Amino acid sequence: MPMPTNEDHGAQDPDNPYCMHCTDLDGKLLSFEKKFEELVASTMETRWMSREQAQRSVREQLVQMPAWRAKVEKLMTKTQTATQTSTPAPSAQAQA
């Protein structure tokens, strides 16, 4: 996210690469889990989405941010793997 003023940076430090929304008062990056859950809850409340829709929307937003990209990609890989392993194999009758 663009940060045109010092106030937009974590701890209002222009050398901090993270924005004030993703950091604590000391400018340290919040945990991904905390930020993800905060954004999902906010999205559900303000955009009237189901949890699944909100999670998808938040992932799409966070994957564009350098601070969160790797975490989102890892989460998406886990989600895809879980979905693939939980999908039952087609039965023999369905193949016949």
Image (tube, rainbow, N blue to C red):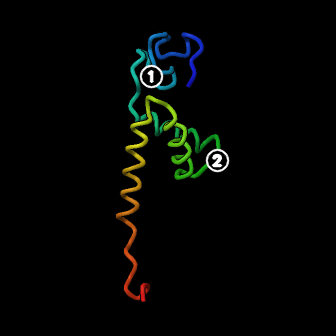
Q: Position of residue 14 (x, y in %)?
A: 49, 10
Q: Residue at x 41, y 88 (%)?
A: 93
CA distance separating discs 2 and 1:
26 Å
Q: Position of residue 88 (x, y in %)?
A: 38, 72
- Tell me the quarter of the image containing the N terminus: top right
SS at circle 2:
loop
The type of residue carrying mark 2 is: Trp
* Number of other residues with Cα within 10 Å of mark 2, as a class: few under 14, some 14 to 19, many 20 or more: few
Residue furthest to the front in view is 96
The answer to which image quadrant residue 95 occupies is: bottom left
* Number of other residues with Cα within 10 Å of mark 1, as a class: few under 14, some 14 to 19, many 20 or more: some
Q: Residue at x 37, y 75 (%)?
A: 89
Query: How many marks on residues?
Result: 2
Q: Position of residue 79 (x, y in %)?
A: 40, 53
- Asked if 91 appears above or below 61 in the picture, the reply is below
In terms of depth relative to the viewer, which is nearer, 9 or 93? 93
Mark 2 lies on residue: 48
Q: Position of residue 11 (x, y in %)?
A: 46, 13
- Tell me the quarter of the image containing the C terminus: bottom left
Mark 2 or 1: in front is 1
**Among the two numbered marks 2 and 1 on one chain, the one whose residue lies closer to the N terminus:** 1
In terms of depth relative to the viewer, which is nearer, 72 or 52? 72
SS at circle 1:
loop
Q: Residue at x 45, y 22 (%)?
A: 23
Disc 2 + disc 1, Cβ < 8 Å: no
Q: Residue at x 37, y 86 (%)?
A: 92
The type of residue carrying mark 1 is: Thr
Mark 1 lies on residue: 23
Q: Residue 92, labelled with which disc?
A: none
